[in-house]
Image: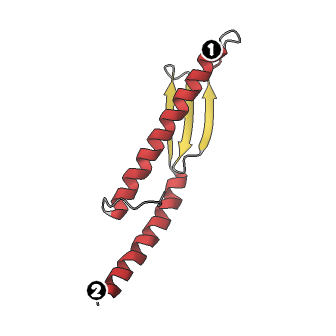
Amino acid sequence: MNMNNLMKQAQQMQAKLAMLQNELAEREVEASAGGGMVKVKVNGKQQLISVSINKDCVDPNDVATLEELVFTAVNQAMKESQDMVQQAMSKVTGGMNIPGLF
């Protein structure tokens, strides 16, 4: 009887995880660098959705600074997206760390 109950719980968790994956794909996080000069959006699947660069920070003589701003903003957005996924997953899994889910 315990095995049947365990299987039902596993199936319910699997269904919740599938719904969560779809929901996370729709969620977005935004991060910026350089006081908002560069903004990026990333979804819950860690896909880059958009990049916005203020024209005032585009200097053909200083491309390295712009590259660093983009790099910083993307990395921050990716981290925030990963944190968002981890928090959402822990709600479904009850805090259990299940390798390979996301």
Instruction: Judge whether 5 appears above or below 41 on screen.
Output: below
SS state under label 2: helix
**Label disc, if present, on residue 78 of the rendered structure:** none
Q: In this view, does 10 lie to the left or right of 24?
A: left
Residue type, mark 2 in image = Asn
Residue type, mark 1 in image = Asp
Residue with the mark numbered 1:
56
Pick out the residue farthest to the top. 61
- Chain-order first, disc 1 or disc 2: 2
Pick out the residue farthest to the left. 2
What colour-coding does the image apply?
secondary structure
SS state under label 1: helix
In front of the other: 17 or 96: 96
Give the residue drawn at x 53%, y 30%. 73
Instruction: Judge whether 68 appears above or below 76 on screen.
Output: above
| Coordinates of residue 38 in the picture (x, y in percent) | 57, 25
Q: Is residue 30 in sight in this rendering? A: no
Residue with the mark numbered 2:
2
